[in-house]
Amino acid sequence: MGAALCLLSAACFGAMAVFGKLAYDAGVSPTALLLVRFGLAAVLLWGVLLARPGLRTPTPDATGRGGPATGRVLAVALGLGAIGYATQASLYFAALELMDASLLALILYTYPVLVTVAAVLLGRDRLTRRRGAALVAASGGTLLVLLGAGSGGFHPLGALLAFAAAVTYTVYILVSDTVVRRLAPVALSALVMTGAAGTLGGRAVVTGGVDLSFGWRGWFWLAAIAVVSTVVAMLAFFAGLRRTGPSTAAILSTFEPVVTAALATLTLGEALTPAQLAGGALVLSSVAVLQLRPGRPRPEEDAPGRPEAARDTEPAPAAR
């Protein structure tokens, strides 16, 4: 059941880029998409917390770390959404306007490797041979993805925006590691969504508002993004994570870009070149290698005090 829930989560997240393309075709603007997605998801998540009060209490991790949330913790959680998530999602959907959904997913999914590199540079982790091999594979895979792009699916600015989204997500993960054990996952996600909705709502007011006059098809795809690719995806991931553990959940989450590429091929007529497929396989294999744990963990790799983001490169709540 745990593995099935993790795969369900990956499939829901993987469908978001395709839902976004279909929303654009229905006349939805990126600004409207982001505002409605975060606003509706925030409302739904707070509704879940009201209906299930037990989800508000954080569960201590295996080392017993955690504790009550302070005002600073709540402020950081809101800031993660207001600054980090709003920026990452804006870059992601701006890139989606310019390039194929499948290629965007492959570029975005370099973020676990970026997290590992940043953790090493910050002194939170050590660069083992296993991680070094994964970084080489990921770098080569990304190069193949870019060099093998077909003329119709690749856009230089779109690729730059996609990589910027991956970098922003990396920073989000490293910062969120400071509060992730102080708040329950659903509560943290609700705060992040609220912060993001607040930023985008304020931006809409300053820029003259958001056009919501699109038809029912646009609302349908927005609802799919908010419900399927945000709320259901997050809750399924958290439920699967509790049953499988972080390493297995992270490995199973590599199914996400595969789903994006498959759905984009079936519904949008997109196609990856053989070089891109090979590059994507290298990127995904590097992510899996980074998550795999040896049979007997060595102290330097699994020290109890090491942050979760550096240890498992596990995505923080709802940062897609």
Image (cartoon, helix red, strand yellow):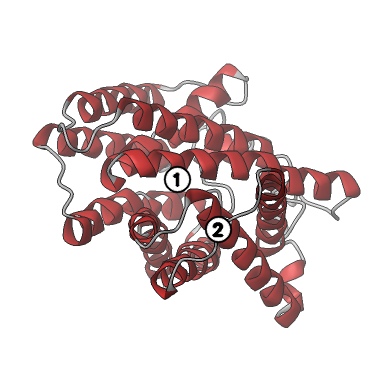
Work out which residue is located at the far left of the displayed protein and give it.
Answer: 274
Q: Position of residue 160 (x, y in %)?
A: 40, 26
The numbered dot on residue 199 is none
Residue 97: quadrant of the picture: top left
SS at badge 2: loop
Q: Quadrant of residue 43?
A: bottom right
Q: Mark 2 or 1 closer to N-term?
A: 1
Q: Nearer the viewer, residue 153 or 49?
A: 153
**What's the mark number on residue 211?**
2
| Percent x, y of residue 169 | 54, 37
Q: Quadrant of the N terminus?
A: bottom left
Mark 2 burial class by Cα count in 10 Å: few <14, some 14-19, many 20+: few
Q: CA distance from mark 2 to mark 1?
A: 17 Å
Furthest residue toward top? 121
Camera-side residue of 1 and 153: 153
| x, y percent for residue 51 | 71, 82
> In screen coordinates, is 301 left or right of 81?
left
Residue at (52%, 60%) from the top-left corner? Answer: 241
Kind of residue indicated by mark 2: Asp
Check disc 1 and report the residue beneath it.
Answer: 93
Circle count: 2
